[in-house]
Image (spheres, grey):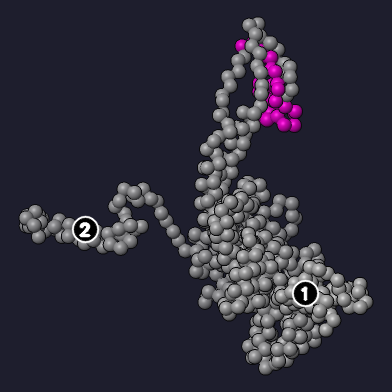
Amino acid sequence: MNFLEKAINSISPQYALKRAVARQRLNIINSGYGNYGANSTKKSVIGWTHGGGSHVEDIEEHVDTLRQRSRDLYCGGSNIATGAIKRLRTNAVGTGLHLKSIINEDFLNITSAEARKLEETIEREFAHWAESENCDMERIDTFYQLQQLALLNALLSGDCFALMTTTTRTGSIYDLRIELIEADRVSTPDKETINPLFCEGIEKNKAGEVVAYHISAFHLLSFKERKPREWVRVEAFGEKTGRRNVIHVMNRERIGQVRGVPFLSPVIETIKQLGRYTDAEVLAAVINGIFTVFIEKDGGGDGRVLGESIPEDMQIDSEDENSIELGSGSIIDLAEGEKANMVNPGRPNPNFEPFVMAVIKQIGAALEIPYEILIMAFSSNYSASRAAILEFFEVIKMYRAWFVADFCQPIYEEWLSEAVAKGRIHAPGFFNDPIIKAAYCTAEWNGPGMRQLDPKKEVEAAELRVAGGFSTRQRETAELTGTDFYRNIKQRDREEKLLKEVIEHAEPSGKVTNNNKDTKSGINNNGGETEEEAEE
């Protein structure tokens, strides 16, 4: 204790005690994060107004506003917003994620041949259901088109719901139907608005488990629907069977969260401001490109337009007699007392593109979409372009895995249960043991492959991974082309046999005359055998 502290302590012990307590608190505050992000004494953070709450205050209470603003941006409010959502949808799902059944043959104690035959049967039966509009409750889309619609709505609105109902239809073997529900229709009934167990249409029990979804018969934002304000309570799982009744496609970001956040939520304000800036620049460039001549006379004119003017349907305010519409090549005779003062907008703005690109890079960073992919403009640098594609494909794999777990796999398991129950698929023990059921339900979902800048290098790298045991032919085939290795082999076998039959039909003797031969493989360019092998 220095001389000043001793003096204060002797004169005013209480004040000295307050100083000691304040000093101790300051030491606590200015330690660890208190020196940086949680500091409350630096000038750089004193004006930082912050606040926070649980997932209810931070997310659920704002999802309606976020949902509507996200849709507005997608519908035309911003080209960047529309492109970002469509880019993710197209790369994650594309034409649809296709089933690849992978039965656990070791656990089921069956041979590889039996497993392969059963997998082919499952895939054939599932294709019959998935490729027909009968899988859709509205009878409009196939299962693969429903995937696109479900993912697009989940990105656009934050989440998407689907009911797995059963309906008998003429000509349809299976009765399972998928009914997509838009996010707005899952809402809290009017009489339950103050119930703490309800959160934006999702009902929980006291243990925090989701037990039911409340779906309105009307759309909350519709002004034309004349339906009563009624809700239907749908249990999340069947009470007796444990069957999943409702599919909820959502990507959570907070513990306890029950409603999803639109994909564009972190950058809604930035995208909106960028859209306004772009519109202003475009309008300024248009005005700058219009050539109009004003004629001033001492005696005044009658305000006639002597040259070309803007058509009435394109005029800003055609009914306002005091407004003057500019037009390309217009010559306007001003009336007495009128004078036109033109302001040079200085367009096109040379700083427009650098500024926009800087903002787009920040938007891409927040959305995990490289800006090259976001605006579909790749540089001439091969390494940079490939790095962007590889980085984006990692994001695609994450979204694809999430969508498969939330949408594709639950629907597939429900369909397989019906197929086994109807005897279309022979799966002993399927309903007796959940572990046996899981062994039959194991599957992979293959979607669009990764984009390739140099296919030769990509194929060579895939061959090295397979040769080194770091990957499999099935996985490499799925990632490179999005197809199935076993189907490719079968198709190749059929093609080679057909090609051989065509060649033999063209040359009855079995000999093929072709000077261009591959001596290493013994195959000529026509795909047939060489003359030496044919003679043998």
The answer to whether residue 405 of the structure is visible from this angle is no
The image shows residue 85 at horizontal and vertical percentages of 63, 56
Q: Main secondary structure of the magenta part?
A: loop
Could you tell whether 14 is left or right of 218 in the image? left
At a point 52% along the width and 55% down the height, the residue shown is 365
Q: Residues within 10 Å of mark 1 (few under 14, many from 20)?
A: some
> Quarter of the image containing the N terminus?
bottom left
Marker disc for residue 365? none
Q: Residue 471 is drawn in which quadrant?
A: bottom right
Residue at position x 66%, y 13% in the image: 295
Q: Which residues are magenta?
A: 310-337
Find disc 1 in the rendering and name its residue: 523
Residue found at x 56% / y 53%: 381
Q: Position of residue 371 (x, y in %)?
A: 56, 53
Q: Nearer the viewer, mark 1 or mark 2?
A: 1
Q: Amino acid at mark 1?
A: Ile
Q: Position of residue 422 (x, y in %)?
A: 80, 84
- Relative height, residue 301 to residue 376 (above, below): above
3D distance between C-alphas at marks 1 and 2? 88 Å
Q: Secondary structure at mark 1?
A: strand
Q: Outermost residue toward the bottom?
A: 109
Q: Is 373 or 107 nearer to us in this picture?
A: 373
